Amino acid sequence: MTADTITPIPDKATAAYIDFQNVSMTFPDGTHAVDDVSFEVRQGEFVTVVGPSGCGKSTLLRIASGLTKQTGGTVIGNPREMGYVFQDATLLQWRTVQRNIDLFAELESMPKKERQQRVAENIELVGLSGHEEKYPKQLSGGMKMRVSLARSLVMEPSMFLFDEPFGALDEITREFLNDELLSLFKSKQFGSLFITHSIYEAVFLSTRVLVMSARPGRIVASFDIPFPYPRTPDLRFGAEFGEIAGEVSHALRGAHE
Amino acid sequence: MSASPETGTGPGAMQASDGVGPEEDVQQAVPVAPPAEKKARTWTAFIGPVLAFLLFIAIWYLMHYWALEAVFDRPAFLITEPDRVIEESFLDGDNRTTLLQGLYWTTVVAMCGLSISIVLGMTIAIGMAQAQWLERSFWPYLVALQAIPILAITPIIASVFGFGFSARILVCVIISLFPIVSNTLFGLLSADRLQHDMFTLHGASRRTRLMKLQLPGAMPAIFTGFRIAAGLSVIGAVVGELFFRRGEKGIGILLDVFRQRNNYPLMYGALLLSSMLGIAVFTLFGWIGNRVVGKWYVSTREGR
């Protein structure tokens, strides 16, 4: 591994910033989903939250994006600057790849010329050239996620919210897309708040991993991941990687009890 | 999470930004059927229906030549044999003209009624999809409308609309409205929750949401409704003509006239025409629907 990497420089002044301060969320039906969660994500940071299913991880993203209003605490951030990538690709079945990627720009009334250019760029960026005119039913799960990603990239968000985007994919495709996501992360320098239940994915991608407990979700541990970027696929098989993954796993198990 | 050897471990196994997508990622949407399978499909698609048709004709002949007299103790002429129906109804020039004119008028009534149902039904459904109180308030009446026997309200219809064309169209609308409302409403309301969230995040207005998310997504359901309603509109037109007989002579009127005159061959000819009209509009709307949504829609009966 080479060391000539740009260490992300956190900068509170930029728009790419999410700050959760003692955030709690209790749903109207009484479900206590999130309890006193505090953390921040800055530009150039890749923060991943791991936790058991149903621990309120996704709720964090919904709160960050403004889709759901927290019942306690404060959230600072700019939802307009955020790209939200859902667990499902949520493609519009009746639109081609190209027109799906165009959707957000269209909804936000971006000038047509700029849209066309950005859409074309991002189709190439996520490796979908040649598939522009296909419909979602003709795509594999991995390709659908690429479309979903490109659709958000068109808006050039400075912060990404990822809700288990690769959770439904097979492991080979998932690792593939992890590698690609990291190249994007490196080239675009966005901030990232990523949700997953895969420890390996979390450690591989992140600058920091937060471990969340079962419901009500609390942050019970935080790990800084020291590996520099770019991270090669080989990293997953190193001893140090295994060690950190082990620690995260341990914390997760502790949180589960 | 196991470190399996084939998970693309080599450095540079993948470069994201070089624009080369993994081709093996592509799924073949329509797998090419092997010859044997194709043969099987020809069998079900072609030979089955032909056999069913032959069976239908055979039963028809059997009724005429044997069953009516031997089993039901009725005169054979009550069910005219198919060849005579064809001969008298469609090979005779005058009779054919009368019947085809009837077909024309019935088609006009059915299509007028269907058009009104489509416009009215979709408007109602869109309204209901926008405001739940509308749905709650008016749904029961729609169900009731659907349950009313037309015969029971013919006097009312006649006293308001007379015995002509407009009364027939009204019957058509009453019969064909419900499937359009229910299918459209179902389609509009079944848009994915996350897709709604997505539209919310990007500041979509109600109108945008309707035009770009709900309506396009509802198209398969809407066309199902159209198809059902199209078949019903033909029934509505014929039934309407049976009651409201002033003016243009549609198939329903002809049916009754021929029955009164004991002209059974022509009566069966009219019956054939009306069922063929029903099949035609049903097929037409199926075809249009397929043209509109077939490219993207994955039906649960894919590969039919």
Image (cartoon, coloured by chain):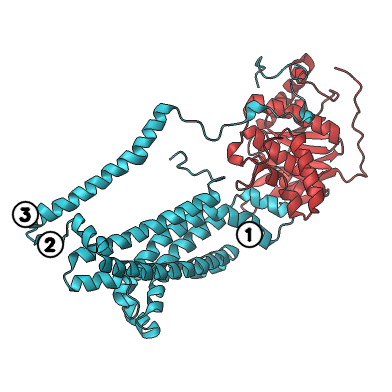
Discs 1 and 2 share one subunit: yes
Return the residue at label 1: B210
Task: Please rate how many residues cluster around mark 1, counting C-alpha atoms within 10 Å: few if below 14, some from 14 to 19, many from 20.
Answer: some
> Could you give the CA–CA distance between mark 1 and mark 2, rounded to whole angstroms?
58 Å
Callout 2: helix, strand or loop?
helix
Task: Please rate how many residues cluster around mark 3, counting C-alpha atoms within 10 Å: few if below 14, some from 14 to 19, many from 20.
Answer: few
Residue at the location (82% across, 33% down)? A185
**Of residues B21 and B249, which is closer to you in this image?**
B249
Amino acid type at circle 1 is Leu
> Could you give the CA–CA distance between mark 1 and mark 3, rounded to whole angstroms?
62 Å
**Of residues B72 and B8, which is closer to you in this image?**
B72
Is residue B213 depicted above or below A165 in this figure? below
Does the CB distance between marks 1 and 2 fall below 8 Å? no
Amino acid type at circle 2 is Phe
Return the residue at label 3: B70
Q: Chain of mark 3?
A: B
Residue A36 seen in this snapshot: no
Return the residue at label 2: B77
Chain coloured red:
A
Discs 1 and 3 share one subunit: yes
Chain coloured cyan:
B
Q: Is residue B125 left or right of residue B9?
A: left
Is residue B57 depicted above or below B43 in this figure? below
> Could you give the CA–CA distance between mark 3 and mark 2, rounded to whole angstroms?
13 Å
Task: Please rate how many residues cluster around mark 2, counting C-alpha atoms within 10 Å: few if below 14, some from 14 to 19, many from 20.
Answer: some
Q: Position of residue B8 (x, y in %)?
A: 70, 19
